[in-house]
Image (spheres, rainbow, N blue to C red):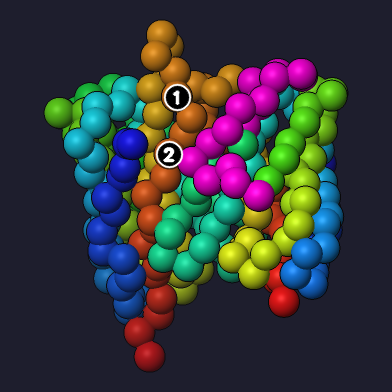
Amino acid sequence: GQQLNQSPQSMFIQEGEDVSMNCTSSSIFNTWLWYKQDPGEGPVLLIALYKAGELTSNGRLTAQFGITRKDSFLNISASIPSDVGIYFCAALNYGGSQGNLIFGKGTKLSVKP
Amino acid sequence: NAGVTQTPKFQVLKTGQSMTLQCAQDMNHEYMSWYRQDPGMGLRLIHYSVGAGITDQGEVPNGYNVSRSTTEDFPLRLLSAAPSQTSVYFCASSYSRGTIYGYTFGSGTRLTVV
């Protein structure tokens, strides 16, 4: 079946650092989404991307929809403590060949001890 | 507040017991789904529904039943709980299965089967 390969699995951040994570697939999608999950809560949508090559920002977050439609990345600039949590990429195809939203396995952001 | 409501938040079951996880949404969404989240496994789809009276299996349906008698509610039933079903369960909803706006998630039910 379709799979999203998300990396890294985990990373430690120090306040002020920039963070990058990415998601790849062997399948083509026409929608890529990035979610964040805080401890004890459900995932919340951060950014949605609908067009190949599209670059979209939401505050300190920037995400891009890969030109091949098989990948996406998320950058967080100048990280702050409240950025810790699990970030999930997700993808689907809307329109004719609809499928359910599928998820990567997540990138866990923690604060450096 | 409008959204997806899941109950209970926590539950401990003994092996072999049955229970129903409740999910309700007040956004008039046609699509509803259940995911389970296990460490390192991400979110895996159990069952989904594209409207009242219509349900279908996802990636990991074994051991779970669903029904959709109303637009608002989509309960998940465990007929005979097993330790392998220890997980965090999330209900999600959206206007349609392939919506460009993604899905709205509930806050989850943490289930432990002993």
The image shows residue B30, relative to residue B90, as above or below, that is above
Does residue B18 show up magenta in the picture?
no
Instruction: Identify which residue is drawn at 42% across, 51% down.
Output: A88
Per the model, the C-alpha gap separating discs 2 and 1 is 8 Å
Whether residue A45 is visible to the viewer of this picture, yes or no, is: no
Give the residue pinned by disc 2. Answer: A102
Residue A21 visible from this viewpoint: yes
Quarter of the image with the N terminus of chain B in it = top right
User: Which residue has dot 1 on it?
Assistant: A99
Which picture quadrant has residue B10? bottom right
**What range of the chain is rendered magenta?**
B48-63
- State the residue at coordinates (47%, 34%): A101
Residue that appears at 78% across and 64% down:
B16
Q: Judging from the image, what secondary structure is the residue with disc 2 in?
A: strand
Whether label 2 touches label 1, CB < 8 Å: yes
Residue B76: give x, y in percent of width and height.
75, 44
* Circle 2 residues within 10 Å: few <14, some 14–19, many ≥20: many
Q: Kindly indicate the quadrant of the structure image that contains residue B93.
A: top right
A2, B91: nearer the viewer = A2
Chain assignment, label 2: A
Left or right: A65, with A90 as reference point: left
Residue B72 in which image quadrant: top right
Q: Chain of mark 1?
A: A
**The residue positioned farthest toward the left in the image shown:** A68
Q: Amino acid at mark 1?
A: Gly
Horizontally, residue A84 falls left or right of residue B49, namely left
